Image (cartoon, grey):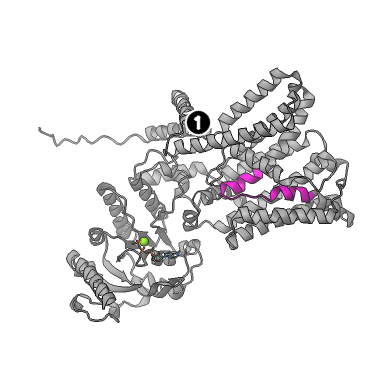
Amino acid sequence: MVVSESTHVAPPPAPEAKEARATAVKRRLWLRRLLQGQELVIAVIGVALAIFFSIYSSAFSSQSNVATLSTYVAPIMIFGIAEVFVLTLGEIDLSVGEVYVLSPFLVVYLHDAGLGVLGGIVISLVACAAIGLINGLITVLLNVPSFITTLGTVFALQGIVLLSSNGIQINPAGSGTIAKILGGSTYSPIIWALAIAVVGHIVFRRTTFGLHVTAVGGNQTASGEAGVRVGAVKIWCFVLCSLLGGLIGILDGYRIGSLNPGTDGLTMMFYGVAAAVIGGTALTGGRGTMIGAGIGAIVLGVLEDGFNIIGINAFAYQLVLGLAILGAMILNIQLERTRSGRGSGSLARLITRLGGRRATSS
Amino acid sequence: MNRPDLSKADQVSMDDKTDPPAAEDVLRVEGITKAFGPIKVLRGVDLHLAPGEVLGVVGSNGAGKSTLVKIITGYQPPDQGQLYVEGEPVDLHSVQDARSHGIETVFQDLALVDELSVYHNLFLNREVTSGGRFRFLNNRRMRADAMRYLEEIQVDIPSVDLPVEKLSGGQRQAIAVARATRREDVKILLLDEPLAAMGAKEAKLIIDLVKSLARNRGVSMLVIDHNYTHIFELCDRVNVVEQGRITLDKRTADTSLAELTEFMVSSYRQQVEGASA
Ligand SMILES: Nc1ncnc2c1ncn2[C@@H]1O[C@H](COP(=O)(O)OP(=O)(O)OP(=O)(O)O)[C@@H](O)[C@H]1O
Ligand SMILES: [Mg+2]
């Protein structure tokens, strides 16, 4: 066989062609990510649930119920956003629910001490951020797993709330415009929640800080070697989480109109974690999505509200919620496995295959 | 040197008496010690690196080579000892510190985040940002720059948008090298086993890149590699790390593959005999 010495070197692909190919890959990746990343799957489930409840009872789509639904969704959404920051690190903040209970009480105490309502709110939020700072410092500097750190803080905060309030229910400080803006009027909580979700998403996806959170959660050593200040990133996440917890506390105080020192903060916190996980945030760190947490919160809210309207009792609701979270976790892990090419989540494989086909044909 | 009974003493010509003056060295390491608990990993390491010089560092597994690199790059502090960059004593408190002195590193574990895209990995912690204090990511710029640079150094990957976990071992390694070499003002490049998982062709690519950086941009390098063929192909000089010290320092032109191998084997024999005696 004679191989000619002619210059049969393939010309390098034109830069435009390469760019086009890269853009195509990017677009496909984006679609795949959306499908695999669970946001779309869970959004479809949410819409299906809403349709189901609307057909079952016309009351579901009534205007007054939309208002009710929004008040279910709002706190879960903010808790979810708050937890995404720490969950993406591979950490968790169990104390944020108790920060939620504490913060409106602090406002009342400060008000009683002669401070203006607004000043009291600001100082209360600073205190909540400080609680996050303590969580972060203990976790980072003393190398205590955040599960343990924040479990300790939960009980400590519970003690503080009960001691300071004598266990007696009180009214939030202030009324009028401030109260209306901060959760008092019907749609105020959901507007706050959506605004926080948008800001959270931008911070998480569009800023250096957000990128570093994902990097640290994905590979702490590598991030450190690349020069990312791992400790600082972690501490900031705990501060943000706690700060958001304090904010929801104040919003919910004005919405409900009274403050109960016995409120179960742990359950509230777990709703947030559930919303985040259902939405596609990995408990193991390295993957988080604010949009997912928002959608997860809507799904949980629709479930709770829908069951109320249908008239299923609270016990059944708990059962279904538990199963839904379990199902979402399993889906999450299966998707993760398929994504990384390990093992074979059959359910996930089906979904990604459908998704992949749709993505390539578009 | 307190090496007992050097039967092959003629081969162990230490030329640290003939070191050039410190001002000429772009990097100088003096008396570095480092212990992890009771284990003394480094027991007083001295080495130097001239401008544009490529220094090979070899030594058995666990000899402390990576620890040395982590100290020079500011990732870990030394217990004792002093670093000099261009004659000036420097205390590196972070990787960022080292970078400000023009030191870049390819870590043995590559320091890549699997979940992030190729271009985010390339720009990790020196992202192109806009918006001043808020540091919004300029993803478009980073993508374009990443594509351009990878093309320039002929690293072939399907897309810079892929998460790094989707790449092969050699491709990941190429990305790690690309990250360290991308900066224009890099002065000292530390490469901790940069060729470990690479095929012959890809290794050649990286070797050529490294050589051209040394030759054309005058970048000084410290290369750790267990493959002596690579050492001889790449390096002007070679140091052997043994039991926490540099025990051999020779120009590659003045030694040979056979001699280096023989040195490693004979010192191993001595260790074994010393232990059993
Ligand atoms: N952070 C640490 N904590 C405790 N011991 C450590 C740490 N880092 C390294 N060591 C120990 O120090 C010794 C030297 O490790 P190092 O990674 O520097 O070796 P090396 O020469 O790079 O080996 P290899 O050729 O296998 O990469 C090993 O015994 C290792 O167990
Ligand atoms: Mg090593």
Residue denoted by label 1: A31
Q: Nearer the viewer, residue A215 or A25?
A: A215
* Residue situated furthest left in the rendering: A1
**On screen, A334 above or below B15?**
above
* Image vertical order of residue A208 relative to residue B64, above or below: above
Indicate the position of residue A187 as horizontal and vertical percent values: 78, 33
Q: Assign the N terminus of chain A to one quadrant of the image.
A: top left
- Please tell me how crowded label 1 is: few (under 14), some (14-19), or many (20+) other residues with Cα within 10 Å: some
What subunit carries mark 1?
A
B47 w.r.t. A180: above or below: below
User: As displayed, is residue A26 above or below residue B215?
Assistant: above
Q: Can residue B277 be seen from the camera position used here? A: yes
Report the magenta stretch's main SS: helix
In the drawing, does residue A313 fall left or right of residue B275? Answer: right
What residue range appears in magenta?
A: A80-103
Q: Ligand 2 falls in which quarter?
A: bottom left
Q: Looking at this view, is B87 or A321 the one in front?
A: A321
Provide the secondary structure element on which disc 1 rests. helix
Across and down, in percent, residue B53 comes to: 31, 65
Identify which amino acid the numbered label 1 is placed on. Answer: Leu
Number of marks present in the image shown: 1
Query: Residue at position x 75%, y 25% from top?
Result: A311
Estimate the x, y position of residue A230 in percent, counting from the top left: 55, 56
Question: Which residue is at the front of the view, A240 or A118?
Answer: A240
Q: Nearer the viewer, residue A79 or A32?
A: A79
Q: Disc 1 beta carbon < 8 A from ligand 2?
A: no
- Is-magenta flag for residue B134? no
Tell me if residue A95 is in the magenta stretch.
Answer: yes
Q: Quadrant of residue A69?
A: top right
Residue A47: name its quadrant: top right
Q: Is residue A126 visible?
A: no
Q: Residue at x 42, y 55 (%)?
A: B183
